[in-house]
């Protein structure tokens, strides 16, 4: 019987899922992805961890819980760093141990640690150690890893070149749905959204922010679409030009994107962050200050497990109305 | 160029001792108070942790007193601390203050970075002078920690409640005033004897509680609302895993030589937490494992929304070593009465548990 490997649909899923899937499928494992986030899952997860844990981790624990009887093993990679002196948030490093500690009866956890500062050999060893769970053949593992890396690169190309969100790109890669790329007319508003993929693309967590904006006829930009140079490598896809040097690996989605939006002069920026997110509490502030100095309207949305959907809708409507009105007035003056 | 530095506990005394002989123009920000906190919360991002806020408050108050250069530490790693300076600088600029941060990376440059920083602020004083003033600062730090250890031990035994604390306060003042090694030694001896000779309760068997957690809130009595003093008033002996003098000596001096003071603690944490998660989270879990049996309980201090301590707190209940832990979150909503009630309940609970075990 093939081994069923569970992957929680949370946190790093949005960034690396195609890569993991390619690797594991090449090695002959069955992939089980947890269901879409829903309110029950969030409250179950939140009940298991201390209350000041950030929302995405609560969601993650909920997903682990929902997977615990559906799979034989659970894949929880630890991404410590992907560039020199750029580390990931502390919460990500504790994930496997956290899942083991708070979810009783969780299946055995497959860990793999990515750490740039420890060099390539360490990475290869980690990949091999993970692959050993499925096959003893090192060449097969090597092939699977190379295939996974190719898939990961393609995943990024798609998001940048076709201006797709990560979710759409994942669906496209796996042929689950066929997409038509809708070209919005040029004169609509362009809103840049700064925020982590696990907040932005989780429809339950972000209260359908992207869908709502699109329904309002706004063309949106998300961090993964932002790029200076489509050929640039994976972790340099947004540049920290004016603002700051990158300190957290996951913060390029916020600061890098915010920086990009202010340079290309979007009509407005929405910063979406989870309550109690450590890095965002500082980085979103920097983006906000930058947007203010560039005279671009900025709205900060903080989501948590109790956020009322109606409140979010009202705020989005008010924000869009404000921008529309300002734009109209400017046109009349000209 | 007028220099300032944010507060952390009594460290300002040691920094003063380092800067004085070098002839540096500096200003010590007022000790943390209500105004510091309200300034800090007004200008900080709302979700950020209390060390950031208090540091910013110190900076604002120091800048009002004419400071234009700020000594600060940074680091690379996973905790917010390494990035404080950038955001604080931005906030101060937006407030209209023109300040410059003078930084040293603690995790990468260790002792050398700090000494280089001293050299820069002293306008390239000779190394001999820098090293001697640094050594004097460290001995003041050691003296301060010795006094604090003694006070935290003796407070549990004092017959008349509230005799130790005034002596301790005076001892800090005396250490601060000491201008050379001789007067420092005299101050330590004098106040040490005073504290050891207070009337004690006969036959008092106090509980022993370990205080662990994030370094800033453990070291700063304003941020943790004097938790050790309050525990002492309840007749409890407290100890901590973290004293700054030891931390500096071991972390900055011996660590580059390959000696790791945390090795045992990390080893103990291994079954529950396999890697360094930044801040002091790994150590917190290890301390719980290692202190079971040695202490009657543990008080875990963390700033609200602290990432490493939050993870550590989620993991701790799952250890098979069973040590009662009281988690106290420190933020700007100070309510000392609430904390004291919790401490009373906690100490009652562990003393009842202890009595039950003994009578069995």
Image (spheres, coloured by chain):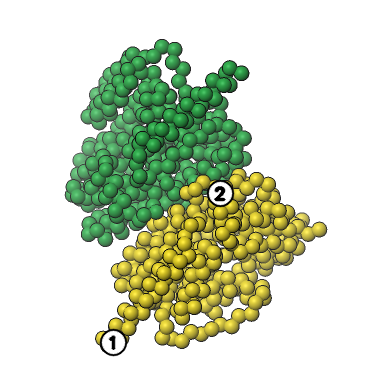
Q: Colour of chain B?
A: green
Image quadrant assignment for residue A154: bottom right
Q: Nearer the viewer, mark 1 or mark 2?
A: 2
- In the displayed orientation, state which residue is furthest to the top: B202
Q: Position of residue B200 (x, y in %)?
A: 37, 14
Q: Position of residue A310 (x, y in %)?
A: 45, 66
Numbered disc 2: what chain? A
- In the displayed orientation, state which residue is furthest to the right: A1
Residue A289 or B348: which is nearer the viewer? B348
The residue positioned 61% from the left and 68% from the top of the image is A152
Is A255 above or below relative to B109? below
Q: Secondary structure at mark 2?
A: helix
Image quadrant assignment for residue A264: bottom left
Residue A136 or B88: which is nearer the viewer? B88
B18 left or right of A277 in image: left
A61 left or right of B180 in image: right
Is B291 above or below relative to B84? above
Residue A47 badge: 2
Q: Position of residue B219 (x, y in %)?
A: 37, 37
Q: Secondary structure at mark 1?
A: helix
Q: How many marks?
A: 2
Residue labelled with disc 1: A332
For disc 1, the neighbor class at 10 Å (few under 14, some 14 to 19, many from 20) is few
């Amino acid at each position: 019987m093939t081994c069923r490997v569970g992957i929680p649909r949370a946190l790093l899923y949005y960034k690396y899922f195609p890569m993991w899937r390619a690797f594991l499928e090449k090695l002959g494992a069955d992939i089980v992805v947890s269901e879409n986030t829903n309110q029950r899952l969030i409250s179950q997860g939140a009940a298991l961890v201390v209350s000041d844990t950030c929302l995405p981790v609560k969601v993650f624990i909920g997903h682990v819980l929902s997977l615990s009887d559906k799979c034989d093993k659970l894949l929880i990679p630890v991404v410590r760093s992907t560039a020199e002196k750029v580390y990931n948030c502390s919460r990500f490093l504790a994930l496997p141990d956290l899942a083991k500690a708070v979810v009783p009866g969780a299946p055995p956890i497959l860990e793999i640690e990515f750490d740039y500062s420890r060099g390539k050999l360490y990475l290869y060893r980690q990949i091999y150690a993970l692959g050993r769970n499925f096959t003893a053949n090192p060449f097969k593992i090597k092939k699977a890893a190379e295939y996974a890396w190719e898939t990961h690169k393609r995943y990024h190309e798609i998001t940048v070149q076709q201006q797709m969100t990560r979710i759409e790109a994942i669906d496209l890669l796996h042929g689950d749905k066929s997409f038509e790329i809708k070209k919005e007319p040029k004169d609509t508003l362009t809103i840049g959204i700064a925020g982590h993929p696990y907040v932005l693309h989780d429809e339950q967590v972000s209260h359908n922010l992207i869908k709502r904006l699109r329904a309002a006829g706004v063309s949106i930009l998300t961090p993964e679409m932002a790029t200076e140079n489509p050929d640039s490598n994976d972790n340099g896809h947004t540049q920290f030009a004016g603002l700051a040097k990158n300190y957290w690996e996951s913060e390029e989605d916020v600061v890098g994107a915010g920086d990009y939006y202010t340079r290309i002069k979007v009509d407005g920026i929405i910063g979406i962050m989870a309550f109690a997110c450590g890095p965002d509490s500082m980085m979103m502030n920097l983006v906000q200050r930058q947007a203010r100095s560039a005279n671009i309207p900025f709205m900060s949305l903080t989501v948590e497990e109790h956020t009322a959907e109606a409140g979010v809708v009202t705020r989005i409507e008010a924000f869009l109305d404000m921008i529309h009105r300002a734009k109209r007035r400017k046109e009349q003056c000209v | 160029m007028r220099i300032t530095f944010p507060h952390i506990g009594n460290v300002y005394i040691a920094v003063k001792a380092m800067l004085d002989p070098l002839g540096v123009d500096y200003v010590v920000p007022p000790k943390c108070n209500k105004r510091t906190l309200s300034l800090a919360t007004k200008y900080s991002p709302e979700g950020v942790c209390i060390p950031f806020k208090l540091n910013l408050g110190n900076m604002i108050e120091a800048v009002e007193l004419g400071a234009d250069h700020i000594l600060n530490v940074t680091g690379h790693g996973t905790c917010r601390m390494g990035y404080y300076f950038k955001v604080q600088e931005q906030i101060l600029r937006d407030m209209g203050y023109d300040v410059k941060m003078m930084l040293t990376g603690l995790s990468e440059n260790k002792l050398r970075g700090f000494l280089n920083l001293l050299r820069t602020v002293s306008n390239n004083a000779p190394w001999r002078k820098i090293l001697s003033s640094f050594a004097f600062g460290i001995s003041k730090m050691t003296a301060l920690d010795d006094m604090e250890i003694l006070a935290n031990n003796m407070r549990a035994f004092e017959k008349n409640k509230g005799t130790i604390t005034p002596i301790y306060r005076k001892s800090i003042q005396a250490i601060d005033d000491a201008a050379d090694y001789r007067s420092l030694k005299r101050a330590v001896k004098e106040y040490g004897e005073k504290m050891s000779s207070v009337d004690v309760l006969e036959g008092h068997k106090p509980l022993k509680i370990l205080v662990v957690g994030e370094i800033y809130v453990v070291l700063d009595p304003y941020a943790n609302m004097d938790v050790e003093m309050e525990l002492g008033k309840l007749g409890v002996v407290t100890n901590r895993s973290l004293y700054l003098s030891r931390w500096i000596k071991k972390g900055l001096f011996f660590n580059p030589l390959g000696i790791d003071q945390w090795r045992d603690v990390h080893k103990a944490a291994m079954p529950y937490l396999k890697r360094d998660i930044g801040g002091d989270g790994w150590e917190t879990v290890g301390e719980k494992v290692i202190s079971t049996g040695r202490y009657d309980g543990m008080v875990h201090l963390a700033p609200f929304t602290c990432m490493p301590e939050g993870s550590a707190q989620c993991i701790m209940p799952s250890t098979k070593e069973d040590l009662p832990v009281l988690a106290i979150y420190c933020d700007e909503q100070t309510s000392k009465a609430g904390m004291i009630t919790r401490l009373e309940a906690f100490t009652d609970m562990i003393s009842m548990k202890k009595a039950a075990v003994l009578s069995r």
